[in-house]
Amino acid sequence: MALNQFAVKLLWLILFSCLKMRIVLYYSHPAELKSVINAPLVEEAKKLGNVKVRWLDELYPNLSMTPEQVSEEQRIIEKADAVFFQFPVHWYSSPPSLKVFMDSVLAYGWAYGSKAVIAGKKFRVICTCGGKMEGYGGEFSASDLAKPFNQSFKFCKCDPLPPFIVFADTDKSTLVDNYLKLFK
């Protein structure tokens, strides 16, 4: 009897470890065609079977969302295990399309409040900085860029994962491999 229980537990462990986290990657980049870091990374993410990429600037170029679009994005998030935001840093913040997305989709009664449908989901910020790491020192560090996002998702009872920040002086020889590890 004990052997059968052990076998069942082992089987579940093996099956569970084979399952990959379903991730929706919301990509915000108003100058994507000029991107030298983000665009190639996102192309690599698109090749992964467990990642759905949504380019916000292409989907919502007018920086507004209809109620139907909001509902569709909420359904996409509900099906995911994790939500990742990827963007280039603009004046120590995200591009406007990501702000519009958050303001529209993370609504009371869905993301937080009476239902909190996204509670328990994983969340990560991936951002690129045009400057070197040393330029993000002093009173403000690069990891501070993720704090407003992390706090927003903590408010929605989500579990933030460590941010991934790329600088101009980041080692490009290992960048793609390190990036792809985020999606496992």
Image (tube, rainbow, N blue to C red):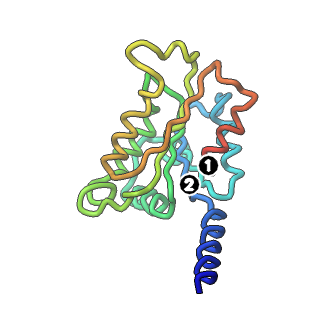
Instruction: Name the outermost residue toward the right.
Output: 173
**The residue positioned farthest toward the bottom in the image shown:** 1
Closer to the camera in the image, 1 or 131 = 1
Question: Residue at left 54%, top 53%?
Answer: 24
Q: Say if 76 sits above or below 27 in the image.
A: below
Disc 1, SS: loop
Quadrant in the rendering for residue 18: bottom right
Point out the residue furthest to the left here: 114
User: Does 76 sit above or below residue 36?
Assistant: below
Nearest-to-viewer mark from 1 and 2: 1
Residue at (58, 82) in percent of width and height: 2
Give the residue at mark 2. 23
Q: Are marks 1 and 2 in contact (CB under 8 Å)?
A: yes
> In the rendered image, is residue 154 in sight?
yes
Query: Which amino acid type is shown beneath numbered disc 1?
Result: Phe
Residue on which the image places disc 1: 183
Left or right: 155 in relation to 16: left
Using residue 174 as the reference point, say whether residue 54 is left or right of it. left
Provide residue 61's location: percent of width, then percent of height: 49, 41
